[in-house]
């Protein structure tokens, strides 16, 4: 299964992927491939999420499943250039066929999966062995409009995502109360951001301060 993608999209996804996290399976980008041919690249740190659908170069070789590419492999590969043009990154996911144990024909040895990321250089890695969250389950069918508060760093991060994806005017946050809010105006992508959990006292404005009088 081969995917060709702009390096800027990988950079955008890595903004939303975990870095230092005990949940090791979040420290990368998940290639979510479905039997119907849909393939989505997903990154999340548990507080924000970015999903970007892509096309597969060789649809006949599509292998349904989830393949988590370690962020180290993606960060290690820089894009090649032709003059002033930045060339895309190529991701090739292959799984060796299952084999029978040489001493016991009833025992099947599952073929290993290898991921090759190629640009100006290349990196070969195995997918992260972990269960990626069911990200589709948390995507709301609609948003309530109930105002929420957010970590400013996460909002700023989506500003960078918007620029990397070629968007203008910054991201739009569709407020959704205590549920995940949907971030739009991210060309070709879907974003989610979790609200801060605050009580009323933390948000209360007690009146004009003396220094502003």
Image: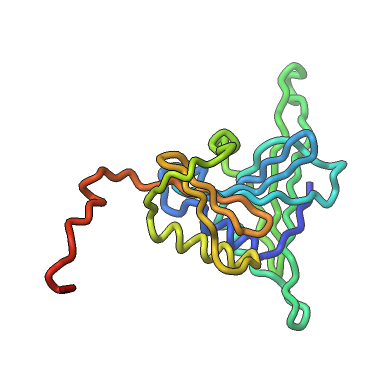
Measuring from the top left, give residue 101's x and y in whole percent. Answer: 73, 25
Along the viewing direction, whichever of 57 and 162 lies nearer the viewer: 162
Residue 130 at x, y percent in the picture: 55, 37
In this rendered view, identify the residue nearer to me: 13 or 2.
13
Residue projecting furthest to the left: 210
Q: Where is residue 180 in the image (x, y as percent from the top left)?
A: 48, 42
Answer with left or right where residue 178 lies relative to residue 60: left
- Name which quarter of the figure residue 66 lies in: top right
Which of the colour schemes (rainbow, by chain, secondary structure, one colour) is used? Answer: rainbow
- Tally of marks: 0
Query: What residue is shown at x 47% (from left), y 48% (from top)?
Result: 175
Q: Which of 180 and 38 is in front in this view?
A: 180
Q: Residue furthest right?
A: 60
Residue drawn 83% across and 52% down? 57
Asked whether the viewer can see residue 69, the reply is: no
Give the image quarter of residue 140. Answer: top right
Residue 179 appears in the figure: yes
186 up-or-down from 142: above or below? below
In the rendered structure, the answer to whether residue 52 lies left or right of residue 82 reads: left
Q: Where is residue 91 in the image (x, y as percent from the top left)?
A: 72, 55
Residue drawn 47% across the image and 51% down it: 18
In the picture, the quarter occupied by the C terminus is bottom left
Q: Nearer the viewer, residue 10 or 96?
A: 10
In the image, 205: left or right of 23? left
**Residue appearing at x 69%, y 67% in the figure:** 121
Single out the residue that lies furthest toward the top: 106
């Amino acid at each position: 299964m081969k995917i060709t993608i702009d390096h800027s999209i990988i950079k955008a996804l890595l903004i939303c992927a975990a870095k230092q996290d005990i949940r090791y399976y979040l420290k990368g980008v998940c290639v979510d491939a479905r039997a119907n041919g849909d393939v989505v690249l997903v990154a999340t740190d548990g507080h924000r999420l970015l999903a970007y659908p892509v096309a597969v170069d060789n649809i006949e070789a599509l292998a349904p499943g989830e393949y988590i590419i370690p962020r180290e492999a993606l960060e290690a590969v820089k894009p090649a250039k032709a003059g002033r043009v930045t060339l895309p990154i190529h991701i090739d996911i292959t799984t060796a066929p299952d084999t029978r144990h040489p001493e016991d024909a009833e025992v099947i040895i599952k073929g290993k999966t290898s991921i090759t990321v190629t640009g100006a250089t290349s990196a070969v890695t195995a997918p992260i062995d972990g269960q990626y969250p069911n990200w589709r389950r948390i995507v709301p069918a609609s948003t309530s409009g109930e105002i929420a508060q957010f970590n400013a760093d996460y909002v700023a991060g989506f500003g960078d995502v918007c620029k990397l994806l070629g968007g203008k005017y910054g991201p739009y946050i569709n407020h959704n109360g205590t549920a995940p809010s949907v971030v739009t105006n991210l060309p070709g992508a879907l974003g989610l951001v979790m609200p801060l959990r605050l009580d009323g006292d933390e948000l209360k404005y007690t009146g004009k301060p003396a220094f502003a009088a």
